Image (spheres, coloured by chain):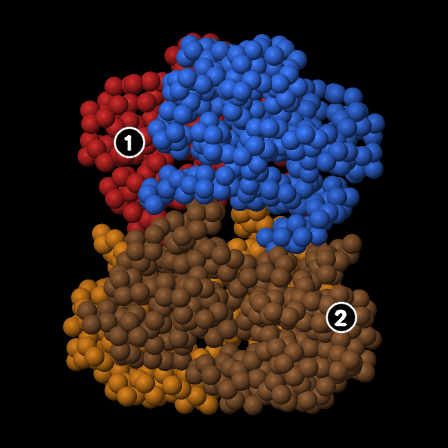
Chain colours: A brown, B orange, C red, D blue
Amino acid sequence: MHPALDHPALPAPGVDWVAGHMPLLHDAFAEVGHLFDGLRIAICLHIEPKTAVMCRLLVRYGATVALTGSPGSTRPDTVTALVAEGVNVHADVDDEGPQIDRVLAIEPHLLLDNGGDLTTALLRRGHGDHFLGGTEETTTGGHVLRARQTPPDFPVVVINDGELKLMVENRYGVGQSVVQGFMNATNLMLPGSRATVVGYGPCGRGVAQTLRQLSARVTVVEIDPYRALEAVMEGFEVSPLAAALPATSLLFLATGARDVLGEAEVALLPDGVVVAGVSHFPHELDQALLGPVESSAAYHRVHRRPDGRRVAVLAGARMINLAAALGNPIEAMDLGLTLQVRSLAAVAAGGLAPGVQPVPSDIDRAVATAFVAARTGVRA
Amino acid sequence: MHPALDHPALPAPGVDWVAGHMPLLHDAFAEVGHLFDGLRIAICLHIEPKTAVMCRLLVRYGATVALTGSPGSTRPDTVTALVAEGVNVHADVDDEGPQIDRVLAIEPHLLLDNGGDLTTALLRRGHGDHFLGGTEETTTGGHVLRARQTPPDFPVVVINDGELKLMVENRYGVGQSVVQGFMNATNLMLPGSRATVVGYGPCGRGVAQTLRQLSARVTVVEIDPYRALEAVMEGFEVSPLAAALPATSLLFLATGARDVLGEAEVALLPDGVVVAGVSHFPHELDQALLGPVESSAAYHRVHRRPDGRRVAVLAGARMINLAAALGNPIEAMDLGLTLQVRSLAAVAAGGLAPGVQPVPSDIDRAVATAFVAARTGVRA
Amino acid sequence: MHPALDHPALPAPGVDWVAGHMPLLHDAFAEVGHLFDGLRIAICLHIEPKTAVMCRLLVRYGATVALTGSPGSTRPDTVTALVAEGVNVHADVDDEGPQIDRVLAIEPHLLLDNGGDLTTALLRRGHGDHFLGGTEETTTGGHVLRARQTPPDFPVVVINDGELKLMVENRYGVGQSVVQGFMNATNLMLPGSRATVVGYGPCGRGVAQTLRQLSARVTVVEIDPYRALEAVMEGFEVSPLAAALPATSLLFLATGARDVLGEAEVALLPDGVVVAGVSHFPHELDQALLGPVESSAAYHRVHRRPDGRRVAVLAGARMINLAAALGNPIEAMDLGLTLQVRSLAAVAAGGLAPGVQPVPSDIDRAVATAFVAARTGVRA
Amino acid sequence: MHPALDHPALPAPGVDWVAGHMPLLHDAFAEVGHLFDGLRIAICLHIEPKTAVMCRLLVRYGATVALTGSPGSTRPDTVTALVAEGVNVHADVDDEGPQIDRVLAIEPHLLLDNGGDLTTALLRRGHGDHFLGGTEETTTGGHVLRARQTPPDFPVVVINDGELKLMVENRYGVGQSVVQGFMNATNLMLPGSRATVVGYGPCGRGVAQTLRQLSARVTVVEIDPYRALEAVMEGFEVSPLAAALPATSLLFLATGARDVLGEAEVALLPDGVVVAGVSHFPHELDQALLGPVESSAAYHRVHRRPDGRRVAVLAGARMINLAAALGNPIEAMDLGLTLQVRSLAAVAAGGLAPGVQPVPSDIDRAVATAFVAARTGVRA
């Protein structure tokens, strides 16, 4: 069982396989890895093979690493592999939350955070002069830190700021892996199917385009006029939600908003519709509106509405690319983790001013250039 | 472990889920299912949720069914589900071959065969006057039966003859599921990757198009000039094998031929190439040429060549859509199984002449029409 | 004015430009052109730059050529260029029909025919022992000759038989040039427009795919279930004609049939619809049903229906790729004319049996191979 | 002859046809057209059917219009049509430049400018209290006005600022019309051809995608790493210029920069390459480097290099979508002109502050919404 997902996890390629497809990260360590030698680093992230490659390299380059995972995403085999490498892993897969206190107990020089909890805890408890600063993976964590009355007195680089990572991960990575997850969870055929994608942000757009490329007929629902115009110009059927729902067989929710489907919308769903989530939280649809669960299996629950119509929800409408696929492709993570490591090295080198800030533009640009070179075989 | 595949099987949707997405098959039974009432039917096929739906319906419509599976593809949970429905399943997942004798022991009125073994055995042992005839799923089985000196004295309908099933399964079903299997097995990113597809028959074409639709850069290798011309006109890079290999990151083998890659070709493979099989048998590449296995995991083995270059082979170069995905999509199987059931019903009704023959054209046409209606929501 | 098209012809690239992009034809003459030396050849075809390249080469290789044009397609500047090369052109652009008698007056050794008129006339009047045989471009001409009670006592090779030429010209050439003609005639924007293509044969399919590739939303209407299924699997909206018409902005007629739109269908056309023809004859729609012409310009007439709705017809619903574009692309004609010349050379060499026959398979295969080599830069 | 383009202009649809496909512009006049009643408006723009629709409506809504054209783009038939409508046209097609003084002589209340010349002249000569302000079409004109030491003491709305118009015109309009112009000028076949697009900005991207959609094999050259990364992720071959040139058959120049191809690059061009311009000025390639002109025709000149290789340049490397097609599609112009008219109406209503400024965001958003509604048939 995948912890907290109440369904079996897909067999995943191991850490060695992943490491073999992360050229940017290895180049980064070859160049700046020595800066981590002798430092203590407290880390909070999803513990799975791709992030494990980075943790392993930090240890191999001389850092002491204490690691805690985001609940619900920790893969036990990855934990085992990391412990064998000397990573100090504090992840109890049954726990409710990350083990903040235990990883901060190493008195870190650096933080690598995911959501802002680690940084917030450190700010609350204070830190010694040895502390250098950190990175924060998520946009949400960046918001939390920027919203503080007193800004941090050390540099915090927010990785997700910036178009580069968003484009590679959201537009391409998510589109591909959402459709992969959908196929794994359902075994349904995309050519000739009738799909509706609600929300045409970077993720929704990636999903809509991938579905269409695989010959589904796709309707886009989008209330922002500029995004709707883009969907129109890309050749999608664009329609209000209420008009799109009755003819939908496959419904992808990608708005990131709450309660997009209320009672009125649920009443429009046709019998047999399959609902998949793309957004970070499954809040677009209150599943209590769908009626009792009639049957369930690995990746779906089928609800029966009072009028007899059935609605199948995949993986509790949680992100289907995490639930039934393997998350972001390795190379997309290679780019994101390289931004992390190079930014953290810049913090370690003492070259950044205090405060919450985006990835330094020279790093951002160099990583883009390296990514192009790695994908095309042309070195700049 | 997936029996005989030495790697874990993907969690599959269950029989009920599959049944809910097979409208053509249910319509067929509603119309002609009564013809099976009271008949004994011996069946040989892959025992997995999609074929199970058909077996279950035969029993529900009054037939007595004895079933044996093709070795290596039997899913134990499907067996359990079928036994609970009253299907007489003779499938020992550790066995070497199908249990021909045990299913023929019911003295069947009808055969539903997959590969010709069942029909050949019946012809050898003879049959009583009650015997009506059968169907044969595969092209190969059809060849075997047509090659006999004495043709069968009963009708045998070969389902795979005919463009309809080939198009839906091979061009669309295989293309989608091969790429899905590749993503499951590797977690690699397709956009911007450099793939070579060897063989541009229906399956290779489906794979090449799906890869390109997902933004890989695809080179096609094809020795037949007409198929090569088609690949050129579709915008693919078309190249001789030796010219394509050195720059390939992902290699898909789809010729169906033997020893397509010999020593000379293996010597051209670049370090890190990933090889996936699309053809029925993994005979295009003698893996002994690749050198010793350096590491292996769920879905791959990494070989190390004497010159130091590594070659990763996925699932032993067996069909990656079966090894790391769920085979054909449900709706494609709905079409194929409906051709089976309607043809078998025509045999049961006594309306067909003896001999090996294609699906009756009225059935073929009606199923095409029904498929269009089911996919578009427009009833003819 | 384009003769007989009552609208201005597009400026066309000249014979030299075209000649520079016909490598297959030049290779063919280099190899077999000497067989035409000293022969008299009577030719009927469309006189435009692409066919002119072939006529010019025949003369340059020593043949005496008498040429007559199909009415309505003769370009006066091409005639001038050919006469300057020593081609004996019998084409009066105002004439009603080809000048059969005048070209046969040269007592030809070979015929190169387009529609069967030349061959039929020769069969009627008889021929001397010097006569060797000929080629026929069109499928229709082939039907006429095959329908004769007495087959010709000389070889006639029908070029259009065979998948090769049909694929290159119809699927790719026509699709591209129809959409080009549509854009030239209307200056309308394809992304986001709503188009219906009636008929999903090779031409209709090419048009539908090109429109969709340019981001139009495309509905396909097709009564043949196999073609409809193919359209569904390619991701098109597939719909009955009556359901498709009311929401159509751009209507492409590609069935090749008569009276596809009768009064009932015309009544469903929305205000402002634009109608373009793809089929050989503009017989799918009786334009008298559309009401009086309210306005007209270079490439369109706008009809006003009694209910006030307007219907714009482009170029009298004649093939829009001829009316407002340049017909087939040069390279597609290079392939077709090379099949012509190599087949005519085989006739001249005396190697073919009498009777109407397809292109010899060795020629067909060699031309396919050469085409691939020319497009990929890889010589076999 | 197209004035100043030394080649024949494509026959264009007339003003009435164009007017029939501009719903946004008509809605805008219905709503705000009364604001122009009694005002004098001096206009500088390209005089062709699409802009003519706007001028005609201004007159019909009570404005007095004095119009001068940008040199080289004035269509005489459009001038005739406008004069007949009462527009005061000062456009001598042989003239060197726009007739600034003559249109300013009407003592305008409003300016509608294209390039900044009109506004600059007015600022130089001063204006009375009756003067209200104006609009400026181009980004370049906006730069000129913003660079002045003293900002204008009246509002000037720069239309091209903002993503909306750029997206519709550049990404979609230009891509489609460049390829249309290329096909008109060459009659070459795109499927299977080998094209290089230099520059992956909005225009280059539109061209690259359209070429690929029509089955060309496309290499992108781009020095900006972020744009190069986008091209990689979209599946294009991405390559340095020098590596791309030797294998290129069709070369599209879309950088907007000067001297992108110098002697070293020209030396790499293969025999027979065809060069087309996409950028505003044909400055990327100094055609003197190409050697003497060997032949020329309607839309091309063929140069012969000292080493014998030929280079064909289409329309002097000027924008091929203007030279051999009809410029932007009507609906794209409908959007751009509606932004113009609504912005000019806001100036007329006196609601804007003095100074150079983008389109008011409520107008921008409303036009996006109206465009979506017009393309989808769904009113918000």
Identify residue type, mark 1: Asp
Q: CA distance from mark 2 to mark 1?
A: 65 Å
Q: Residue at x 26, y 82 (%)?
A: B65
Quadrant holding the N terminus of chain D: top right
State the residue position of label 1.
C271
Question: Dividing the picture into quarters, in which one does residue B361 lie?
Answer: bottom left
Q: Which residue is mark 2?
A: A347
Q: What chain does mark 2 sit on?
A: A
**Is residue C162 visible to the viewer in this orientation of the structure?**
no
Q: Secondary structure at mark 1?
A: loop
Which of the pair B226/B318 is nearer the observer? B318
**Which is more toward the observer, B253 or C306?**
C306
> Where does the image place residue A114, in percent across and percent down from the top left?
60, 74
Is B252 located above or below residue A215 in the figure?
below
Q: Residue at x 40, y 59 (%)?
A: A198
In this picture, residue A197 sits left or right of residue C377:
left
**Residue A344 visible, this angle:** yes
The C terminus of chain D: image quadrant: top left
Residue type at mark 2? Val
